[in-house]
Structures are given as structure tokens and as C-alpha cells.
Image (cartoon, rainbow, N blue to C red):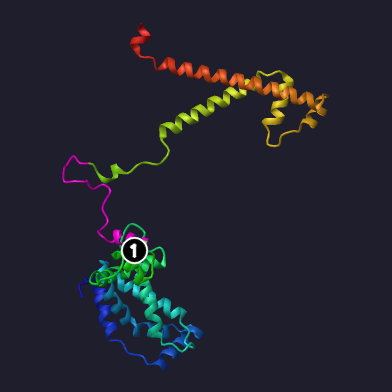
Amino acid sequence: MGFQDQHTRRFVREAMASELLDAETETELALAWRDQRDEAALHRLIRAYSRLAISFASRFRRYDVAYDDLVQQGNLGLMRAAEKFDPENGARFSTYAAWWIRASMQDYVMRNWSLVRTGTNASQKKLFFHLRRALQREEGRDGEGTLSARVARELQVPEAQVELMMGRMAGPDLSLDAPQSSDEEGRAWVETIEDVGVNTEAQVLGEIETRRRRRALYQAVADLPERERRIVSARHLTDEPTTLSDLGQAMGISKERVRQLEERALARLGTALRRADADAEAEIADRTVPESEAAA
């Protein structure tokens, strides 16, 4: 079968030689495991249907996944089926286990087929496992609409997802470090990706500017007359601003007078900050003057 692991070869031989269970024996073993947690019954039930895992593993080999890994995933699905199976619902364990084995292998293939996450919903999973066959059928037929539209109607999925999956399955994953051409000096694909993150230089300059303006603000507040400084601090530099009425009572002046002092203080702060910004711009301009101009 193409696999090399000796443990897998031995497992396959033993599984194909294991006993075949009738419906009555299946039910007895399943009840013994469910009600009494009889591990011997569980092991016998699983061994009898390990051939299902081998059968399904052969079907999924076309997705370039290691056969040994597929067999292991099938066994995991088989054990999950034994844990979930209700022997009193009338179904055969083999029928129930087949669903879990297939689901376990499908999930494994989807996770390992590509580095890019594929099959995140039911439509994408259906497309992944049925797209190639549907394309082969539709290419030989005459019908209305594009090929992707006909496939979408057949599989009952959105056409946009058909087109997306056709692109995803058109070729294997490529490394971003791979060159775009055979030219040794050609750019790698990673060099064509735009960096949408924050520019480091702009971020650092922004933080420096924020700290400068904060220092200028605190200095401007400190330079205010005592009453105006008190009002600004109580009204704008605390988590819970004090009302004009409360400030007026605490300072022994009217509410209107507090408002006037606040407006005057804010105007002074605005003037001080504009002056600080102008001084900073002038300092930057002096630093960037060409040496030839500075010497002249």
C-alpha cells in the first residue's frame, strides 16, 4: 500500500484478520462499554472495525497526506464513535462509526493540506472534497452560465466560494521567500507585500511630540495665576470635574465669575501652547538647515 512504518503494516494485517461481528454481538459489546465501562468489550468492538479506518485511509490518499497518519486519524474517529454510540437507537455500529472515521480524516486533511486555513465552513468543506469531480462533470456538459456558476448550482454553494476554492486548489503553496523569476537578482514574493502596520519612525516621532505637548501644557498651567490654575485643575485635570457652582462656593465667588476666569485661563493656555509649537517648529527648522547655508 505504499506505507513504510512497520507498526502500521502489522496493524493492517491484524485488522484485516479480525473477526466480523453480527448485530447482536455489536449491541452486547456496546452496552457493556456504555453501562459497565468494560474495556475488553471496547477493545473487541474497535478491533473488529479497524478495517473501516484502513478502507477510508485508502480513499483519502489522493490528498497527499501520509497513509500512516490517516490510519491513526481513522482510529481516533473510531474511538470517538464508540464513546458516542447509543446501542439502543437501532443503528449498526459500523454505520455509525463510518461517519466519525470519515469526519476525522476530513478534518485532518483540511488542517494539513495547506498552511492557509481552508474549509472553515460547511460550504468550503463540501467544495474541497467535491470540486474536482464536479468540475470534470460540468466541463463535459452544455449549460447556461460560467463553469463556476454551474458547479455552484450543482453543489448548492455560493458561486463566489466556488471561484475562491478553484483558485486555492489551482496549485500548491509557495514560499514567500521564493524568487518571482529565475533571475538570481529577482525580488522575492515577500518583498511585494505591503506593510500595513504602523510606521515605526512615525510612531516614535508621535510619542515624542505627545510628551513635548504634555510638558508644555503642564508648564502653561503652572504659569497661570493661582485662581485660574485652581479652576483649570478642578475643571479639566481631574477624573470627576467640579461644577461651576461648587467651585464658586469653595472660592467665595459667583458661578459666573468662575466661568469668566475659566475662559480667560483656557485662552492663556491656548496662546502658550501655540507659542510652544512655534518654538518647536523653529528648532526643527534650525536643525535641518544645510551646512552650506549655515556657514553662509
Kind of residue at disc 1: Val
Quadrant in the picture for the N terminus: bottom left
* Mark 1, secondary structure of its residue: helix
- Where residue 147 sits, quadrant-wise, is bottom left
- Where residue 73 sits, quadrant-wise, is bottom left
Q: Which residue is mark 1?
A: 162
Name of the residue lying farthest toward the left = 183
| Left or right: 93 in relation to 113 | right
| Residue 247 locus on image (x, y percent) | 78, 29
Name of the residue lying farthest toward the top = 296
User: Which range is magenta?
Assistant: 160-186
In this orientation, does residue 122 appear?
yes
| Residue 65 locus on image (x, y percent) | 27, 67
Residue visible at 28% across and 83% down? Answer: 14
| Residue 203 locus on image (x, y percent) | 45, 33
Was residue 1 drawn as part of the magenta stretch in this picture? no
Q: Nearer the viewer, residue 174 or 16?
A: 174
